[in-house]
Image (cartoon, rainbow, N blue to C red):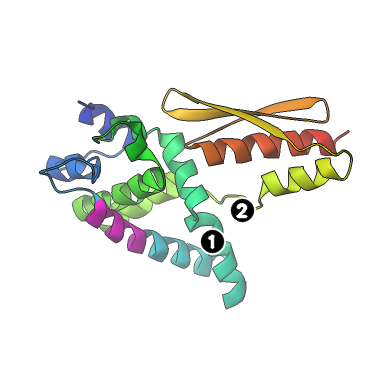
Amino acid sequence: MPDLARAEAALGYRFKEKALLRLCFTHASVSGEESNERLEFLGDAVLELYVTEKLYRDSSAREGQLTELRKRYVSREALEGAECRLGLLPYLRYAGGEDALRGKTASNLYEAAVGAIYLDGGYGAAADFLSRTLFETDTRNYKSLLQEYVQQRSHMTPVYDTCAEEGAFVCEARALGESAAGRGANKKLAEQAAAKSLYGKLMQQ
């Protein structure tokens, strides 16, 4: 059974209503209990408002540019990165083995945390949480960039070796005689991180 006291510490927020904390870390695969899906729905709206207001106040960009900037904060990759930095997944209560954690589980859990904190402490508490945990993410596809770079110089394609390690994934990317590692909340993020690192390494040569 996951330790909810440690989950609370990982969030960096002390709940007045502990039932919200438990609900936040209850996956839909757990039968007979309410899951965190409704919290995720709420958290998504709070997140959107927070980022929209932040960009409105901090940037003089036009509406179309603001929309593109917002994607860097609210994309699946950005939310999964925030979850990975906090290390929340090990505290999620789920059933059915690790297959239950595929897909958008990490980003959904982060949104559920935002929703739970909002209900427990109001918008100010949620905004404080977002201000210290959510960061702009580079949305470029580094796997595609790396593949294009490599195929311009050889008939080979990059090779990725990925494994699960301590609640996250670690990947090694290899191409053109060089290698680099990356880490992420899921396999896709780990591969992107490794590709970014290797692409930067090759570009410096």
Does 101 sit left or right of 196 as displayed? Answer: left
State the image coordinates of residue 181 (x, y, percent, origin top left): 65, 27
- Residue 203 visible somewhere in the drawing: yes
Secondary element under disc 2, as helix, strand or loop, is loop
Q: Quadrant of the N terminus?
A: top left
Q: Quarter of the image holding residue 72?
A: bottom right
Of the numbered discs 2 and 1, the one sitting upstream in the chain is: 1
Q: Is residue 39 magenta?
A: yes
User: 40 above or below 99?
Assistant: below
User: 99 above or below 105?
Assistant: above
What is the magenta range? 37-46
Q: Nearer the viewer, residue 113 or 92?
A: 92
Instruction: Identify which amino acid the numbered label 2 is placed on.
Output: Thr
User: 180 above or below 135?
Assistant: above
Q: Residue furthest bottom?
A: 63
Does 73 sit left or right of 116 as displayed? Answer: right
Q: Is residue 129 magenta?
A: no
Give the total of numbered labels. Answer: 2
State the image coordinates of residue 198 (x, y, percent, origin top left): 74, 34
Q: Which residue is mark 1?
A: 71
Q: Main secondary structure of the magenta part?
A: helix
Q: Which residue lies at the image location 85% right of the left edge and 39% below the top edge?
A: 155
Q: Quadrant of the C terminus?
A: top right
Instruction: Identify which amino acid the numbered label 1 is placed on.
Output: Lys
Q: Which residue is mark 2?
A: 139
Q: Residue furthest left?
A: 32
Q: Which mark is residue 26?
A: none
Say whether marks 2 and 1 touch (CB < 8 Å): yes
Secondary element under disc 1, as helix, strand or loop, is helix
